[in-house]
Amino acid sequence: MLNTTDILETIKMIREDNLDVRTITMGISLFDCISDDITRLGEKIYDKITRSAKDLVRVAEDIEARYGIPIVNKRISVTPISLVGAGLTPDGFVRLAKVLQRAAGELGVNFIGGFSALVQKGATVGATNLIEAIPQALTETEIVCSSVNVASTKAGINMDAVGKMGEIIKQTAYNTRDKDSIGCAKLVVFANIPEDNPFMAGAMHGIGEPDQVINVGVSGPGVVAAAIRKAGNCSFSVLADTIKKIAFKITRVGQLVAAEAASKIGVPYGIVDLSLAPTPAAGDSVAEILENMGLERCGTHGTTAALAMLNDAVKKGGVMASSHVGGLSGAFIPVSEDRGMIDAVKAGTLSLEKLEAMTAVCSVGLDMIAIPGDTPATTISGIIADEIAIGVANTKTTAVRVIPVWGKGEGDVAEFGGLLGYAPIMPLKKESCSEFIKRGGRIPAPIHSLKN
């Protein structure tokens, strides 16, 4: 039972330390919409989404008003569209993307995810056609998000898909070049994609999920940073306990919102995602957490160890607070969305290579990283392959969301706006990996995948 002290502490975290519920995401299955007539398919998808999520925004706003807890985003995720529209051409998939845009716009949500394909072991015709449609679909819609799973620990890495995604990212960057290639911010490439992730751009409604479900993502980097400052010059054991206790309290807020929203809408409560998701706002930074542990600047020696401890403590504290934890759960390190990360890149302390090392111990991967617009597609594929290999080898989710900003180069700044923030263009290796990428085929699954 909550006591007065707990309630007052939560109020302080909201008012002073940027605690919020980053997203309420409603997952919706579209399998019952399948039709061999594209017009009918689009109508059924539109009807299913608008009917299922008609109360989502209102309920979220009611919860905000009742409890005083900010809920930043209201989102929808759907069944991977490559499965629902398996027989469509690329043009047909673009039409479905516009249906998703229209339904989400009607409901007033911030994003809709699930323009997705699962190709970790090979691509069906439907998956291939959806991937071909991504650049046009993301150019002609504003709030549709796309994800492609190119690898898993059980299947290995589909290098044909990795090579293709380098080309797709380049084309998407060109298509949205008038807006600093922002289309790429709505596209993420995964290994071991979770089926219940509430965060964009990678949210989708997995095939093992119920017909509708409510998933919630909480966020409190500022709260954790403040707790570490208050703890002072303590040992790592004490520091870990401090983080666990505050993660427990943050997660309880998320579970309260998730259970309340699910009850009011009349659908099951799915999971709480424990991820510490930063914003460009001052005091809402994962980098600041690491620096409060004693690092002069995020990215310097010791950063990976600090992040590993943070991620582990967040998970341990959060899992005690909720009966259902899922999604990504841990700490995000998106460059453009974290003021501390941006400052570290500007200072030259944080490089792409250091970020890659950090992803081995945190929740996701290379996220919201701006790179020169003239980067070859094969180099982008090489970046994807390196990051995806970390996920496959370590049996964890990793992902890549890089933005080759058309017309800009190292030293320039890309402006995305809102929660997406801004990012300095990061330097890359000049040497080519094209012959490696062109080999194609599949990198076999690691030996530890054979667990049956």
Image (cartoon, helix red, strand yellow):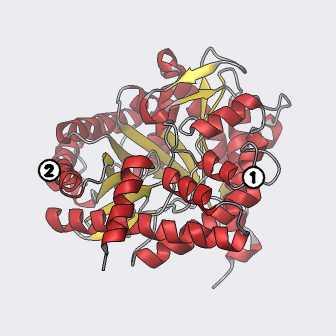
Helix, strand or loop under label 1? helix
- State the count of labels: 2
Taking 328 as reference, is 61 left or right?
Answer: left
Q: Amino acid at mark 1?
A: Thr
Which of the 4 image quarters holds residue 154?
Answer: bottom right
Taking 221 as reference, is 87 left or right?
Answer: left
Residue 175 place in picture, x, y as percent = 49, 21
Which of the 4 image quarters holds residue 232?
Answer: bottom right
The label on residue 54 is 2
Residue situated in front as seen by the camera: 175 or 330: 330
Q: Are marks 1 and 2 in contact (CB under 8 Å)?
A: no
Dot 1 or dot 2: first in sequence order is: 2
Taking 311 as reference, is 265 left or right?
Answer: left
Task: Kindly identify which residue carries mark 1.
Answer: 303
Residue 210 place in picture, x, y as percent = 29, 69
Query: Of tags 1 and 2, which is closer to the observer?
Result: 1
